[in-house]
Image (cartoon, helix red, strand yellow):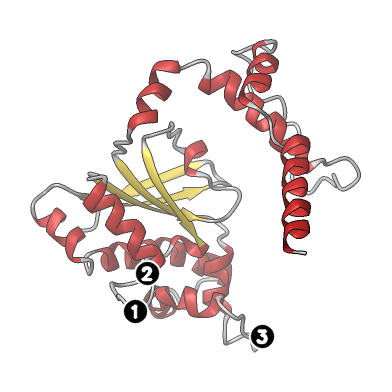
């Protein structure tokens, strides 16, 4: 019975691999037939909100995306990828929001090997705690202790859903989420500051200010990690905050005094 189940599982895995995975050689042949200099054909062609339910094919999106990467990156810059086969030496650790509109690799043009990335709701960093927040802590520790990054950048952004939730709950009386509310409470100090200092502004304006203040909370929390604080004191690490406004198409960059 166990052997039959194993055989069925093996056949299933082979079928999945056969139907979905692009082999490097096949993808290479197909990508070489395309223009290496052309931009992503899909970029900018679809307006947000357009209904694509009838025509969107997730498998083709993955396949075409990988072919585009091979054609425009992997086969175009072999020296760079040969170096990356051996090791990585990123100069940046970047914390950004999980929001699909704010990919750091796009808005700041990071190339493979340049930035160690971490993304979560609200681009938040909790204070040092071995019993809680080990996911974020392990990212910071690996970047600082193993990769020896020299720059840590925390990027907030406009119209952040995580910040909006922080600013509206529990005052709006909505039911709590299982994970989100506890997570965004990391930036409670930012919310408190905005409510006191900008109480006459609209809710939308308060949210945008809070998004920047939440970055500052995360920057301050970074100092609670002993290896980060040591790197800052020895001037081996620089901490910076950023704010990407995708409505205005602008980017702010700052350091806390």
In depth, the one of 192 and 109 nearer the eye is 109
* Residue most extreme to the left: 234
Query: Residue 61, can we see it?
Result: yes
Residue name at image x 75 percent, y 35 percent: 18
Residue name at image x 66 percent, y 22 percent: 27
Residue 169: name its quadrant.
Answer: bottom right
Q: Is residue 158 above or below residue 213?
A: above
Query: For the residues carrying marks 1 and 3, which lies nearer the camera in this image?
Result: 1
Q: Position of residue 105 (x, y in %)?
A: 48, 38
Residue 90: name its quadrant.
Answer: top left
* Residue most extreme to the right: 54
Determine crowd level at label 3: few under 14, some 14-19, many 20+ residues with C-alpha closer than 10 A.
few
- The secondary structure type at the circle numbered 1 is loop
Q: Is residue 220 above or below residue 169?
A: above
Q: Position of residue 66 (x, y in %)?
A: 64, 30
Q: Position of residue 250 (x, y in %)?
A: 47, 42
- Report, in whole angstroms, how far the alpha carbon at label 2 lies from the one at label 1: 7 Å
Residues at circles 1 and 3 in contact by the CB criterion of under 8 Å: no
Q: Give the numbered dot on residue 9.
A: none
- Report, in whole angstroms, how far the alpha carbon at label 2 lies from the one at label 3: 29 Å
Residue beneath label 1, please? Answer: 131
Q: Is residue 66 above or below residue 13?
A: above
Residues at circles 2 and 1 in contact by the CB criterion of under 8 Å: yes
Q: Is residue 50 left or right of residue 36?
A: right
Residue 99: name its quadrant.
Answer: bottom right
Residue beneath label 3, please? Answer: 174
Query: Residue 47, can we see it?
Result: no
Q: Position of residue 92 (x, y in %)?
A: 32, 43
In depth, the one of 184 and 226 nearer the eye is 226
Q: Earlier in the sequence, mark 1 or mark 3?
A: 1
- The secondary structure type at the circle numbered 3 is loop
Residue beneath label 2, please? Answer: 134
């Amino acid at each position: 019975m166990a052997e039959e189940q194993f055989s069925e599982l093996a056949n299933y895995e082979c079928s999945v691999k056969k139907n979905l995975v692009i082999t490097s050689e096949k993808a290479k042949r197909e990508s070489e037939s395309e223009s290496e200099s052309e931009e992503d054909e899909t970029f900018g062609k679809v307006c947000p909100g357009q209904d694509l339910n009838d025509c969107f094919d997730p498998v083709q999106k993955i396949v075409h995306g990988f072919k585009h990467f091979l054609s425009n990156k992997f086969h175009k810059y072999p020296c760079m990828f040969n170096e990356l086969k051996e090791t990585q030496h990123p100069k940046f650790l970047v914390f950004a929001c999980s929001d699909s509109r704010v990919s750091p690799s796009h808005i700041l043009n990071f190339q493979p090997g340049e930035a160690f990335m971490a993304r979560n709701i609200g681009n938040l960093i909790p204070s040092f705690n071995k019993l809680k927040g080990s996911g974020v802590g392990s990212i910071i520790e690996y970047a600082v202790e193993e990769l020896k990054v020299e720059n840590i950048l925390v990027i907030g952004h406009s119209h952040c859903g995580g910040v909006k939730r922080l600013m509206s709950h529990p005052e709006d009386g909505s039911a709590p989420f299982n994970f989100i509310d506890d997570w965004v409470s990391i930036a409670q100090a930012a919310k408190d500051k905005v409510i006191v200092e900008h109480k006459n502004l609209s809710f939308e304006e308060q949210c945008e200010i809070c998004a920047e203040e939440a970055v500052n909370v995360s920057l301050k929390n970074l100092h609670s990690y002993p290896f980060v604080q040591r790197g800052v004191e020895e001037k081996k690490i620089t901490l910076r905050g950023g704010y990407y406004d995708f409505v205005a198409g602008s980017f702010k960059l700052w350091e806390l005094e």
